[in-house]
Amino acid sequence: MNICIVEDEKQLADSLKKSFESEGYNCIVCYEGETALKTISSQTFDLLLLDWRIPKISGIEICKRVREANNQTPIILLTALSDIKNKIEAFNYGADDYITKPFSFEEVLARINAVLRRYKSVQSSIEFDDMSLNLIGHTLKAPSEEIKLPEMEFELLKYFLENRASIVSRETLCEEVWKLPFTPSTNVVDVTVKHLREKLEEISDKKYIKTVYGEGYIFITE
Amino acid sequence: MNICIVEDEKQLADSLKKSFESEGYNCIVCYEGETALKTISSQTFDLLLLDWRIPKISGIEICKRVREANNQTPIILLTALSDIKNKIEAFNYGADDYITKPFSFEEVLARINAVLRRYKSVQSSIEFDDMSLNLIGHTLKAPSEEIKLPEMEFELLKYFLENRASIVSRETLCEEVWKLPFTPSTNVVDVTVKHLREKLEEISDKKYIKTVYGEGYIFITE
DNA sequence: AACAATTATTAAAAATTTTTCATTTTTTAT
DNA sequence: ATAAAAAATGAAAAATTTTTAATAATTGTT
């Protein structure tokens, strides 16, 4: 889970980052708007946490621009103003939720989970790098072309994308992707990973699935 | 397109119904909340148009209950109050849009289309009768069981559901579902329809796909 | 460097899905 | 009622996907 925090109050930003990391989330902090926009457009996040009031480019402005760039990443705004008018504005610019300062970290966690749950249940594609997995058509789309993945390869890639940057064992894949109550004595997983790797490399020329010797696989975007 | 209008001002309700029907939409009107809740829970609509202020159970209360029942049908609220506070409330209760009275029918149409476009692009299942087609898992779910559909059967059923209640010819299906630039000399379509019919009947004991002699097929829910 | 464990590769078997085709049944018009 | 057209059916061929299994290559440890 990659979160981008945009917050100019260094102390608050760093404390949030620390708390998120203790929850096992990956965190990138931007202290002002210009950097934030660059960061957000250059990598994929699962969530943007934007402070409303930051110097020069405000959080709401970032929100607006992100949506204009057709980026649907969930956005939560942090606001010192409890002013209702601003909340309306937030929704109109495409924010998914807002949290009024001061807040507890528990509240932030709860809001994030609610937003992500909602987002995930209506998500129709998963983006990574400059590619995209269409969850409805089961197709893998690169800038150059789009191919249809067979069922198991689709399910496998979907699982990898939902568990990016963490090691997944063959046993886990058997349970979660193949829905097997046991780990088979054969190498189905290995072979399907090979097939998926071939397609991913053919379409993107990159190696997304790394092997962690003795542990399993890990899906990395870079 | 089935729309449920909940509006106590009989004159307005009937005028809306008439306008919608001239646009080719199907319309059911409820004049008060209790009936509305029953109607909404017993059949599937593509859109709910709720007046905020109706006697006993208000539109916003209906909205809230519909969402509590895990029904994701798009909802547009009609409100006489331009009060901002209420708009916030509407979004919080899961409405998709609101229209401030007085309004023109053109405005209603425009809002409806915007909401439906948005909804369709993030929809992860299509409901019909007491069944549901999961667009991501490609499964067909009845109250009793859930089965996985093979690719072509899934695409075919999806197309039928998106074109409910209208006749679709074999030629159209070849183009739209099979993406063939020509109509093949074989009966692929017929055979796939047969397979889909078998699964639908097995799981629901109903015959959804009727044949229109010389014309094509029609998908009917009832 | 050598060994064992793990992973990758290759090819074929098994299972499933998709398509074809011949035949039967149904529908409509005469 | 009958013939012609259209649709349904059954079964097998073709194509694709999934799984298995044997072998090769790689990795980590001693």
Image (tube, coloured by chain):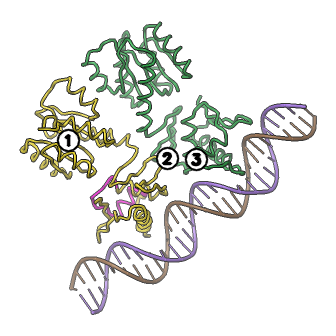
Chain colours: A yellow, B green, C purple, D brown
In the depicted structure, whether residue B186 falls above or below residue A189: above
Q: Which residue is drawn at 34% across and 19% down?
A: B60
Q: Which residue is drawn at 18% across and 37% down?
A: A59
Is A168 within the magenta? yes
Whole-percent x and y of residue B70? 39, 31
Is B162 within the magenta? no
Disc 1 from disc 3: Cα separation:
42 Å
- Write down the region rendered in magenta: A161-178
Whole-percent x and y of residue A13? 11, 44
- Mark 1 lies on residue: A49
Check the residue under mark 3 and report the chain it is in.
Answer: B
Q: Residue at x 24, y 37 (%)?
A: A63
Q: How crowded is mark 3: few (under 14 residues within 10 Å), some or many (20 or more)?
A: many
Disc 1 from disc 2: Cα separation:
34 Å
Q: Residues within 10 Å of mark 1 (few under 14, many from 20)?
A: many
Asked which secondary structure carries label 3, the reply is helix
N-terminal of the pair, mark 3 or mark 2, is 2
Check the residue under mark 2 and report the chain it is in.
Answer: B
- Mark 3 lies on residue: B153
Q: Kindly give the residue lying farthest to the left in the view shown.
A: A11
